[in-house]
């Protein structure tokens, strides 16, 4: 028998007891989200749905914008934006239906609609999850004006191709049509992500002809806020087995299903241009300073994730849970946090960092998530500088040897250079600098560290010239090559 597909017309067929996000009669679009992937649907969209319920309003529905592929449009449009979140712990599995996404738009196919949505005075927030590489930055952090897509967006002769181009052109129309204030909230794993986006928008405006860019930036500085945020939830890729289990639980087919762990965290800088959803009423933390929370997450959780991804993949482990069950790798992960990262952190008052470290390994050990090592290993050239190299730099400046952080960096180098695990199986190199990295890695094992340190998109001169770091990396690379 053909199982009906999830949509507003089939909700009466859903299994009794499955929570369903209720859309109020006044539900309308108040948020535009750039980059509507699995993470947003399992994190910010869930917080937003719960915030609308807590406030008793429907004015914060989401227009989700796909940046490249129209895959999410095909998944969610026939389902009226509805989708399930399959929550997995090591003890139980549950599913809920989220209804905060009202519209899904392909930026490539409907650029005018995207621009109109950002310009709409009823929209009070634009959020972003476009990944590190989606910001099109130079190694120094500024907008890469040599990028051909950025150049095309500045020319304005065709539909914008980049996230910053789409945002800036939407802000331009908003200024022209109504001038309503707007909060732009990045939810990507970037240090000071709010300031990152603000700087990139400023760079975009500065690169426009003065008569166009100067009044736009003047308006932005007075009417648009760019708070920083820190987000945390493990959201592995959805599998056919996940979809089958969700169908069994809800009684409906769901092409837009996402999978997540029970844990979720959102810390947001309390700096808004106007009203925002009542996220603070449903678990989000509003704070004047996101930086300490951000550093904790990047240097403890994300850095450890990367260490386990590269060492685990090289050892032949398919998932992070398998890697963390390896006593040697688990000990390395714990040492990275306690010995290298922890001394560099400013502790938030409401976080017990000893408990946080334990929770990191407990979360990674959840076998129900099946978070693949090679998935976490993606985009290493973008992730290492924000997850690991800050810790390395701080410890070197303190006169210490960051042995465990160096182990993670060395494992990345070997992952790039060898491209195979201990059993000889190929490891994918999914990275925007893949060709550059392969060229650097090619050659003798003995020169690998020097060649990889010369990749200036990843390593700055301070790190490249450190004899201590070079020695640590050479030692770790040799160990990894021998054990393989």
Image (cartoon, rainbow, N blue to C red):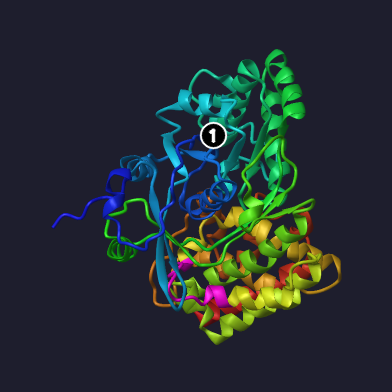
User: Residue 137 appears at what percent x and percent y?
Assistant: 64, 41
Total marks in image: 1
Residue 372 in magenta? yes
Left or right for 37, reference 201: left
Q: Is residue 455 above or below residue 368?
A: above
The quadrant where residue 387 appears? bottom right
Mark 1 element type: loop
Which residues are drawn in magenta?
362-373
Q: Main secondary structure of the magenta part?
A: loop
* Along the line of sight, the residue nearer the viewer: 120 or 394: 120
Closer-to-camera residue (214/124): 124
Q: Is residue 167 above or below residue 404?
A: above
At horizontal 57% and vertical 20% (from top left) the residue drawn is: 155
Number of residues whose C-alpha sits closer than 10 Å to that of mark 1, classed few (under 14), some (14–19) or many (20 or more): many
Is residue 349 depicted above or below 354 in this figure? above
The reply to whether residue 336 is in sight is: no
Residue drawn where x is 67% and y is 68% of the image: 300
In the image, residue 406 lies in the stretch drawn in magenta = no
Using the rendered image of the protein, determine whether residue 274 is visible from the camera's viewpoint.
yes
Q: Is residue 12 above or below residue 152?
A: below
Query: Which residue lies under the disc numbered 1?
Result: 162
Q: Residue at x 37, y 63 (%)?
A: 17
Residue 180 locus on image (x, y percent): 66, 25
Closest to the observer, 94 or 244: 94
Q: Give x and y (percent) for residue 101.
A: 45, 43
């Amino acid at each position: 028998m053909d199982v009906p597909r999830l949509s507003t017309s089939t909700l009466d067929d859903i299994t009794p007891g499955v929570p369903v996000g209720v859309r109020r009669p006044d539900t309308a679009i108040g948020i535009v989200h750039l980059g509507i992937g699995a993470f947003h649907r399992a994190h910010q969209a869930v917080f937003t749905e719960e915030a609308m319920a807590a406030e008793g309003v429907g004015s914060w529905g989401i227009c989700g914008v796909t940046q490249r592929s129209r895959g999410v449009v095909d998944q969610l449009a026939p389902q009226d934006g509805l989708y399930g979140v399959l929550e997995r712990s090591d003890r139980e599995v549950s599913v809920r239906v989220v209804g905060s996404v009202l519209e899904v738009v392909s930026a490539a196919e409907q650029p005018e609609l995207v621009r109109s949505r950002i310009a709409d005075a009823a929209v009070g927030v634009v959020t972003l999850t476009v990944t590190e590489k989606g910001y099109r930055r130079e190694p120094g952090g500024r907008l890469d004006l040599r990028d051909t897509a950025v150049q095309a967006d500045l020319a304005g002769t065709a539909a914008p191709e980049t996230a910053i181009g789409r945002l800036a052109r939407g802000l331009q129309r908003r200024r022209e049509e109504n001038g309503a204030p707007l909060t732009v909230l990045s939810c990507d794993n970037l240090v000071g992500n709010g300031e990152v986006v603000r700087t990139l928008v400023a760079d975009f405006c500065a690169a426009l002809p003065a008569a166009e860019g100067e009044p736009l930036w003047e308006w932005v500085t007075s009417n648009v806020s760019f708070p920083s945020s820190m987000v945390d939830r493990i959201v592995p890729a959805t599998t056919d087995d996940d979809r089958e289990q969700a169908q069994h639980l809800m009684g409906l087919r769901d092409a837009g299903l996402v999978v997540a762990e029970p844990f979720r965290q959102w810390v947001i800088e309390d700096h808004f241009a106007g009203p925002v959803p009542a996220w603070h009423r449903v678990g989000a933390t509003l704070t004047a300073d996101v930086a300490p929370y951000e550093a904790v997450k990047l240097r403890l959780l994300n850095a450890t994730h990367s260490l386990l991804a590269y060492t685990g993949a090289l050892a032949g482990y398919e998932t992070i849970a398998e890697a963390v069950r390896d006593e040697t790798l688990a000990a390395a992960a714990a040492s990275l946090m306690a010995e290298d990262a922890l001394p560099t952190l400013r502790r938030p008052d409401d976080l017990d960092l000893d408990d946080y470290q334990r929770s990191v390994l407990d979360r990674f050990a959840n076998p129900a998530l099946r978070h693949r090592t090679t998935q976490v290993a993606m985009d290493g050239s973008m992730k290492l500088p924000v997850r690991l190299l800050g810790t390395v730099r701080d410890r070197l400046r303190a006169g210490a040897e960051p042995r465990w952080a160096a182990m993670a960096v060395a494992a990345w180098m070997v992952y790039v250079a060898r491209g195979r695990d201990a059993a000889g199986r190929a490891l994918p190199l999914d990275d925007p600098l893949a060709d550059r990295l392969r060229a650097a890695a090619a050659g003798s094992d003995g020169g690998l560290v020097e060649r990889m340190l010369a990749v200036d998109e990843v390593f700055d001169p301070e790190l490249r010239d450190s004899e201590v770091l070079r020695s640590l990396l050479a030692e770790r690379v040799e160990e990894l090559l021998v054990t393989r």
